[in-house]
Image (spheres, helix red, strand yellow):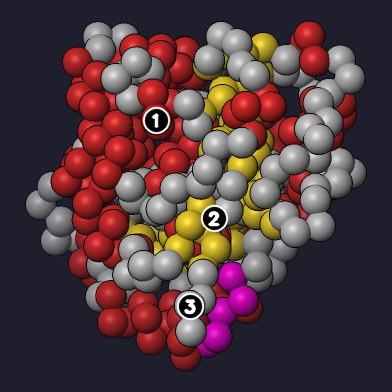
Amino acid sequence: MIHMPSNFNHVVLLYPKEIDWGNWKQQKSDVPFSDSVVEFLNAFSSLLLKDKDARRYPDVATLAFFCRKANVLTLKQEHNSEKLRLGRGIVFHVAPSNVPINFAYSLIAGLLSGNRNIVRVSAKEFPQVNIVAHAIELLSEQYRHVTDRIALVRYERSDDATTGFSAFCDVRIIWGGDETISKIRQSPIPARSIEVTFADRYSLAIVNADELVHEQEMKKLTESFYNDTYLFDQNACSSPHLLVWLGSKENIYSARERFWTSVREVVSEKYDFQPVMAVDKITSFCRQAIALPIQKEAAQDNLVWRVLLEDLSDNIDEYRCAGGYFTEYIASSIDEVVPIIKNKYQTMAYYGFSREDLINFVLGNRLPGLDRIVPIGETSSFSLNWDGYDLIKTLTRKVSVL
């Protein structure tokens, strides 16, 4: 028996326009990376790349490239080595409100792992949500076998709706802050169901100044940094807030000057700065200055705020602000960051370090945090390995035949 929310009228169906939840629940799970899903995603990609409205949003364009058949088949080779796996069933996704396109990646992970998907999108009206929902609707006739496994819903915070969907899901995925997760956990899931949480995280970047001083394409690098930070107003969990500089004293001075000058140029060209952000930055600086010995770096305006630390405090993750507020620290060794890294740390962006050095850094220090270490420019690039989870394995069950 399906227990639906007692007050279901306030739940808006973005796709499909109507649904028989009883029949919907009876659909069978699929194998991971089924041919029908691969073909659907490729058609979905083509549709988005041709859509004039979609091309206005860089995050939608990035989503379209992710869904290309060539990329999905590469992912299949990486994640589908075990033959006897099936989707767990119904995945209830609770999408975040700070990254507009995130819901679509969560949905795609659910489809690629062979599941039916109920996606609760943010109550905020993001154009990207409507673009994706419209594309799915346009493909619904040709790819009915896939689109029948998609339900996009929107509602204000509601214990009834969340409890109703939670009551019959096989997996619940929650993207959100710690308070949001705690509140949603008050709605129970079935005993055999599992839960995956993507909680509030903190991210940083490390830069080798000895390499950066020789960089010939500084604007390309700082545009990549812009995408890591300003593209989502520095609200994504993967957006760096702390920058750690390494190298000789002379090179650090020169590299910081070149880097931040270029960052400001890129930001002034691309970013829609809101006056309220200036107030937020002043407030954040005052709060940080009360607690920590810091120095504000000179700036022409409020586009880029930089604060230099004297010491690397283990609670630095508590002091952050959106819209281009960066804390810097000059280190003599990468190992200086080890004491501050806890399980709240998600992503470390890097420049000027070898992959082997970074692997040795992780294994040598047995870090309790950092699930992703990526080049600058890749922090927001979605992967099927996210927050330490292999999403395909997590969202499927393995069948043993002896």
Residue 120 location (% of width, % of height)? 64, 28
Q: Residues within 10 Å of mark 3 (few under 14, many from 20)?
A: few
Query: Does any portion of residue 124 appear in the rendered image?
Result: no
> Looking at the rendered structure, which numbered label has been put on residue 382?
none
Residue 260 location (% of width, % of height)? 34, 44
Residue in the picture at 67% in, 12% down: 12
Q: Is residue 395 left or right of residue 135?
A: right
Mark 1 near mark 3, Cβ–Cβ under 8 Å? Answer: no
Residue type at numbered disc 2: Leu
Per the rendered image, the range of residues in magenta is: 365-370
- Residue denoted by label 1: 145
Residue in the picture at 50% in, 32% down: 149
- Residue denoted by label 3: 401
Q: Find numbered disc 3 in the image and state the secondary structure of the residue it sits on.
A: loop
Q: Is residue 320 left or right of residue 178?
A: left
Query: Does any portion of residue 148 appear in the rendered image?
Result: yes
